[in-house]
Image (tube, helix red, strand yellow):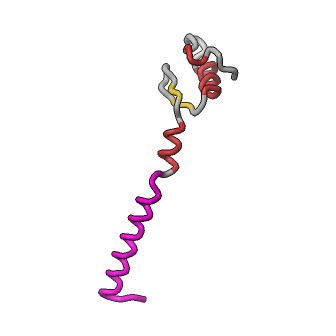
Amino acid sequence: MARGHQKIQSQQKNAKKQAEMKKAKGHDQKTAAKAALVFTCSVCRSQMPDPKTFKQHFESKHPKSPMPPELEGVEA
């Protein structure tokens, strides 16, 4: 095991290496998932990844509300 000054140097080197790896990674799963949620429900503001899911959500959660125009031609 390293002691004293060598230990501190090793910790600093490792911290720098970890920071560079994190920077090179770019994005994580959370941001990628957020970018995939394209459709937003106008009633409850929940987000869906595709029009089929959006239409299913709208039919089940908001049956009394009028269907948005972007969902008219979509088959569920």
Q: Nearer the viewer, residue 63 or 42?
A: 42
64 versus 1 height, above or below: above
Q: Position of residue 59 (x, y in %)?
A: 63, 19
Q: Is residue 54 magenta?
A: no
Query: Which one is in front, 72 or 43?
Result: 72
Residue at point 39%, 88% (across, down): 2
Image position of 61 with respect to 18: above or below: above
* Residue 64: percent from left, percent from top: 58, 11
Residue 28 spot, x, y in % from top left: 49, 52
Q: Which quadrant does the C terminus fall into?
A: top right
The quadrant where residue 12 appears: bottom left
Q: Is residue 65 left or right of residue 21?
A: right
Which residue in the rendered view is the most extreme toward the front? 24
**Against 72, is 26 above or below?**
below
**Identity of the residue furthest to the left in this view:** 5
Q: Which residues are magenta?
A: 1-27
Q: Is residue 26 or residue 33 the one in the foreground?
A: 26
The verdict on residue 22 being magenta is yes
Residue at 54 percent across and 38 percent down: it is 36
The answer to whether residue 52 is above or below residue 72 is: below
